[in-house]
Structures are given as C-alpha cells and as structure tokens.
Amino acid sequence: MAPHPARGLNPTVDVVPPTVTSSALSPERRAEDFLELVERSKRGRLKLYIGFAAGVGKTYRMLQEAHALKARAVDIAVAFVETHGRVETEALVAGLEVIPRRKIEYRGVEIEEMSLNNVLKRDPDVVIVDEIAHTNVPGSRNRKRYQDVMELLDAGINVVGAFNVQHLESLKDVVEKFAGIPIRETVPDSFIRLADQIVNLDLAVDDLQERLRSGKIYQPDKIPWALSHFFQEQNLTRLRELALREVAESVERNSEARGGDAAERQLSEAAGGGHSQRRVMVCLSAGAPAGDTLIRKGSRLAGRFSGDWFVVFVETPREAPDQIDSESQRILMGNSDLARELGAEVVRLRARDPVDAVLDFARSHRVGHLVVGRSRRSLLQQWLGRSFPMRLVREASGLDVHVVATDDGEATP
C-alpha cells in the first residue's frame, strides 16, 4: 500500500475493547483484528474511524483497510464513499466493488444517496460507509445514515464507517460555542457505544492546515475562508482534544462493560440500597429552550460513568397541558425526543413541589448525579435560597448536583 499522502501523520489509535491495539499496526494487521471480531458474531460488527476535522485521512484509511480485507478473500464492497475530488482517495476506490447508489431529484437537483435496499440485496460480508452523520433526502427509508447502518448491522452485515467528532450529538453545544459555526448533522452517543472498534485518526494541527493550503482537502476558492473560520488553530486544537478524549472514554466504557465489574457494582448497590454514583438525572421544565443543552450535558456525564440516566419533567399545576402554551409543549416534546435518541429514559412526574418530586425519584432509583440549569428567578430568590437549584443543593444530601449555566438562564422545573 502506498503511504498516506498527509505529511506528519501520527500513528492511528486503534481501540479494540477491552484492550488497545498497537498504534503502529499495518492496514493488513488492522483488517485481521476486525475480521476476528466479525467471525465471533452473527450480528454485524461495527468499526468506526473518528477524526477531528475533514482531511485527517478517515476515508483514505477505510479504503486501505478495504483493500487489505479483499486481499484476504473477504467479500467486501463500498456502500458509500465521498472522495471530495481528492486524487489519492479516488485512486483507492479503483479495484473495489461499489454498490450502485440511488439517485433522487430534490428541489430540482439530482442527489445521490447510499441505497440501503441495494446493499441489503447484495448482502456482502463487510461494507464501507462514509459520512455516517449525513441526513438523508426527505422521503428516504430512514432520516439519518446512521439509522441505515443500524439496519445493516441487524441484517448481519459488518460495517466500517467514519465521521468527525464534532458530529457527536452531546458535543454539539460545545463545538458550536467555541467554533462559532452551527452543527446541523449529528450522531447520537448511543450509536458510538455500539462500536466494536474505534480508530482515532490523529494529525498535527500544523500538518492539517498545510494539507488544506496545498489543496488536498478543499478546492482553492474555499481555502481562505476555511483557514479564517473552522480551520483556525484554536478550533482544531480543541477538536483534536475532544476526539482523543472520546476515544479514551470509549476504551474505559467498554473495558468496564466487558470486565465484569458492572455486575459487581449492581450486586453491591442492591445489597447496600444506596445511590449509584453512575446514574444521572437531568431536570427539565416544560418550555425550557436550553433544555437540549442540559440533555447533552447529562448524556456526556452518563457516558463517562457508563451508567443509566433519566430526563425528568415535573408537571406542577401551573405546567399542566392545559396551562402551558403550544410553544412550550413543542419544546418539551422536542427535548423528550432528543433525550430518547441519546439513550435516556424520559419520565414525567406530577407534583406540587418539584424539588420533593425530583429528590424522591432520585432516591428511589438510586441516582447519584442531578443536572439542573441555572434558574432565572430574581437575585433575591437566589440569595434567599428559594430557587430550584439552590433548594436542590441544600436538600439533596448524598447527591451531587451539577448546576449548568445556559445562554437563556432557564432550564429548570
């Protein structure tokens, strides 16, 4: 195989739960490791390549692995790859079977999408799926490409896929805040936890910017804008840190899940009847516009602990369905859908006092961490300790209360 064209590419970090594979492995050896996982399960296995920005080499490495698997007589095909006109990447597509895409006319433009039906009909052992965070054209079988991938896995087809870390749902708010750009396409955290292998493609920030300047990532007319916006050094540095941290946490989650200590924790909690420090609960009000921020915070916290988590809304008499406006109801439904997508159990309680209801639920379900937004009540209420967060801090003995600052300042019962 030809070396990767990127100058100064650091070794790949292969995460093979519960251990970490050597970062110096060749594509052939990495392919062999994945093949061993494939042979151990009838359900499809998932391998993810994660990068911190476009141009780090995700697609290139996936295609390298495809050739290595083909050389071992594995039935492999390309379900969807986007080369973005990069010559080195296009050269690697040659010699691989490419499953025909479906063509759809949308708003007067012909768009090519991955054909889920064609892939299922072809039924290869392994398929390559790029840009997993992609949103499918309206009218498609699934709204998102990651949902297509889950169907392939359920059908017993093994998938090697890729996406960038900024598309992870729970990081959306963080990246939008420091990068100053909207993240429109996301993948739920629950999806990445399905992965049997995670590969972080790490590249020095200076080298990535040099690749951009030399025209190996975007067309020349887009380079100046990219360098002055998303590809600024501070943005890339933060994204690189997030990618490394996500892979490290994935190692820890999978090691614990497969090492037996999860069962021991459950037995210990059942015997002691105390709180599970790994269970998280997010508290929402009916029309909190920043509720999605709290949900993503809760998702990240639950992900670090590898624990169950809840999103709880307390319906007080003032927040009964006939008392709140349609906009508040729409926000509540949207927050509930997001929470379920990220893997939370959504709970609706009815009570006059939201603090008592939240604490009763937390203690009966052995929750260890409460996540709540900063209240917009008056400074006097805050100082007197009557606001929802302050009451929780005062009354939640034995629980950790995380008070999260939100842009609008209101996300609590």
Image: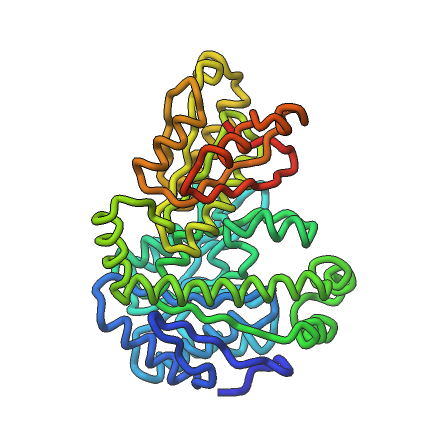
Picture coordinates of residue 238, whole percent (x, y): 64, 62
Relative image position of residue 47 (x, y in whole percent): 38, 67
Placement of 283 over or under 116, stated as above or below: above
In the image, 15: left or right of 405? left
How many numbered marks have been drawn onto this rendered protein structure?
Answer: 0
Considering only vertical position in the picture, is 31 above or below 345?
Answer: below
Which color mode does the image show? Answer: rainbow
Residue at (62, 80) in percent of width and height: 6
Vertically, is 356 above or below 177?
A: above
Q: Residue at x 33, y 78 (%)?
A: 33
Q: Nearer the viewer, residue 387 or 323?
A: 387
In the shown orientation, is residue 233 left or right of residue 182? right
The picture places residue 202, in percent across and down from the top left corner, at 56, 73
Which residue is rendered at x = 42% and y = 21% of the image? Answer: 315
Residue 317 appears at what percent x and percent y? Answer: 44, 14
User: Which sits in the foreground, 266 or 328?
Assistant: 266
The quarter holding residue 159 reads: bottom left
Query: Is residue 153 at all visible to an observer of this figure?
Result: yes
Tell me if residue 115 can be seen: no
Corner quadrant of residue 204: bottom right
Within the image, what quadrant is residue 288 found in?
Answer: top right
The residue closer to the viewer here, 292 or 63, is: 292
- Looking at the image, the residue that sits furthest to the top is 322
Direction from residue 371 to residue 108 in the image, left or right:
right
